[in-house]
């Protein structure tokens, strides 16, 4: 059995010395976990979601080195291969890894969200990015209208930014 703690430790080691990135993936993980549980998703999808939330930005490090950019476009290109290697070392199965890599490769592509795991990952990432990017209330409302679909994600968004 794989443990989320193993993924967290591997990601902390991968981003050693970069507390900003470590804090980001831990916050996204926390929100994704809560939204997934509140939405009552299946246990296997919940595990996949939690792992994907932890590694969703794994491509930033190499994107900054190769392209001098942390752009979502480059993250989606570079992230899957790094995540695949890490998750294989941690003993995850091929199909599980393939879906996590798909989510990494599409977590900044909002027009084709294709599953509850993808929807929740995007919502959790936005909840964190709204704060980290210091978005204005008008931008938050637009994001909510265009992106958010889950009852739990909308509730968390409102509790974080509208009260």
Image (cartoon, rainbow, N blue to C red):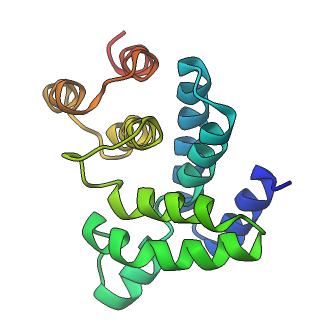
Image position of 25 with respect to 114: above or below:
below
Q: Residue furthest top?
A: 163
Image position of 39 with respect to 12: above or below:
above
Image position of 109 with respect to 61: above or below:
above
Q: Is residue 154 left or right of residue 54?
A: left
Residue closest to the eye, 89 or 32: 89
Q: Is residue 65 left or right of residue 5?
A: left
Q: Residue at x 51, y 68 (%)?
A: 58
Residue closest to the eye, 70 or 33: 33
Q: Residue at x 39, y 22 (%)?
A: 150
Q: Residue furthest bottom?
A: 66
From the top left corner, tell me how far across and down residue 49 is, in percent.
Answer: 56, 44
Give the number of marks: 0
Residue closest to the eye, 29 or 161: 29
From the top left corner, tell me how far across and down residue 108 is, in percent.
Answer: 29, 55
From the top left corner, tell me how far across and down residue 67 is, in percent.
Answer: 29, 86
Q: Is residue 128 left or right of residue 70?
A: right
Q: Which of the 4 quarters of the picture holds residue 33? A: top right
Can you say which quadrant of the picture contains the C terminus? top left
Q: Residue furthest front?
A: 95
Residue closest to the eye, 127 or 81: 81
Q: Residue at x 40, y 39 (%)?
A: 115
Q: Which of the 4 quarters of the picture holds residue 129? A: top left
């Amino acid at each position: 059995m794989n443990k989320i703690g193993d993924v967290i430790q591997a990601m902390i080691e991968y981003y050693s010395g970069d507390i900003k990135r470590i804090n980001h993936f831990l916050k996204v993980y926390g929100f994704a976990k809560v939204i997934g549980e509140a939405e009552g998703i299946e246990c296997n999808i919940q595990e996949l979601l939690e792992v994907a939330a932890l590694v969703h930005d794994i491509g930033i490090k190499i994107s900054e080195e190769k392209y001098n950019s942390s752009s979502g476009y480059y993250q989606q290109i570079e992230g899957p291969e790094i995540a695949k290697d890490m998750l294989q070392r941690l003993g995850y199965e091929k199909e599980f890894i393939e879906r996590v890599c798909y989510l990494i490769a599409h977590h900044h592509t909002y027009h084709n969200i294709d599953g509850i795991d993808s929807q929740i990952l995007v919502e959790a990432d936005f909840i964190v990015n709204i704060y980290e990017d210091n978005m204005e209330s008008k931008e938050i409302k637009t994001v909510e209208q265009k992106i958010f679909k889950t009852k739990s994600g909308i509730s968390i968004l409102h509790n974080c930014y509208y009260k």
